[in-house]
Image (cartoon, helix red, strand yellow):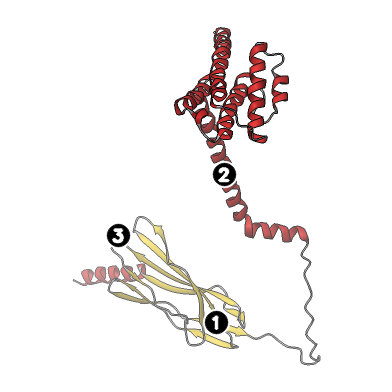
Amino acid sequence: MRLLWFIAFLFILQSVEAQKASMELEQDRIRIGEQAVLHLYFQYDNPKEDALIGWPYYDDRLTEEIEILDRTVDYEALIDSASSTFLREQKLVITVFEEGEYPIPPQRIELNDSVFYTNPEYLVVQTVKVDTSESIKPIKDNYEVPYPFSERSKDWFLRNWYWFAISAVLAAIFLLVRVLKKRKGEEEEEDIPQIPAHITALNSLHELRLKEAWKSENRKQYYSNLTDTVRLYLEQRFGIYAMEQTTREIIEDLRNSDISDEDKEFLRKILSQADMVKFAKVQPDEESGHQSLNRSIEFVDKTKKEEIEEQNNTEEDEN
């Protein structure tokens, strides 16, 4: 029976020794306002992995005189895998602003339903010795620290770099949109078939014929429409700036063209007649106006054949 009691006592003693709470100061002597690190350790067995550790609760003070500046989370380390013994650690950064010797009482650590206490510690806080034999010296003036332009530029760029990044992105988007629009416009222009010059001219001239525009009282408007149609046809068909040129300049540019002399004379007369109507307020009769329209249609019909032949030659060259 005594043997059983002895074995039980040894088991209980071993169990108690396996759980150990301790506390240690890295620096037990500091000056006023300096910092010291306080370590809290707790060693325990956890074979069933069901241990719940309860650390002391602090606000911003360890004692009435000792302030806590920082507190870390607790760290766990396995120190003996055979017995599943672990070591938990927590660090406190403390300081004191009065000279003296300050006791740190044992700290309470809980393990499930059991309570353990650490050892106490003592922190000695020393003041800074002042030499009272010397008189008080005046406060030194502030002095300016050199801040060269290169450093100022670098600091300014680091503070405002994102504006450059935003501007670069916006510029890239703008250029991309412009390029895409231009490319789209060029593709649309390529897709739109070009209407031959004689088709445009004959449509306008036949419209004047259907309206019997030569009978209009506004002869100036009629001759303006008629000659503008002829000028546009000449510009598109023969590549001259007929819309901005005078009658003499048009005839001069057509001198080496394949237009017959008769047709050149007709152009000179109809364009000169239109100039007289617009600027000299001449009023030709209806018959002259009708003949001018018919001759214009004949002129376009005669010269369009050569245009068709040139287009056919171009297509043959491409093939």
The mark closer to the camera, 1 or 3, is 1
Q: What kind of element bears circle 1? A: strand
Quarter of the image that includes the C terminus: top right
Residue 62 lies, in percent from the top left, at: 47, 81
Q: Is residue 220 above or below residue 104?
A: above
Badge 3 density bin: few <14, some 14–19, many ≥20, Cα 10 Å: few
Counting from the top left corner in percent of width and height, residue 184 is at: 51, 32
The nearer-to-camera label among 2 and 1 is 2
Q: Which residue is mark 2?
A: 174
Question: Viewer-proximal residue, 141 or 86?
Answer: 141
The amino acid pointed to by label 3 is: Pro
Amino acid, disc 2: Phe
Image spot of residue 125 (x, y percent): 59, 84
Residue drawn at point x = 57 percent, y = 44 percent: 174
Which mark lies nearer to you, 3 or 2? 2
Q: Can residue 239 be seen by looking at this rendering?
A: no
Q: Compute the Cα span from label 2 to label 1.
A: 69 Å
Question: Closer to the N terminus: mark 1 or mark 3?
Answer: 3
Residue drawn at (59%, 46%) of the image: 171
Work out which quarter of the rendered image holds the N terminus and state it. bottom left
Which residue has dot 3 on it? 47
Amino acid, disc 1: Leu
Q: Secondary structure at mark 3?
A: loop
The residue under label 1 is 123
Q: Is residue 132 left or right of residue 281?
A: right
Question: In the rendered image of this protein, does residue 83 appear above or below residue 123?
Answer: above
Instruction: Please tell me which of labels 2 and 1 falls first in the chain.
Output: 1
Circles 3 and 2, Cβ within 8 Å, touching? The answer is no
Whether residue 153 is situated above or below residue 123 in the rendered picture: above
In whole angstroms, how far apart are the C-alphas of marks 1 and 3? 37 Å
Q: Which label sits on residue 157?
A: none
Q: CA distance from mark 3 to mark 2?
A: 68 Å
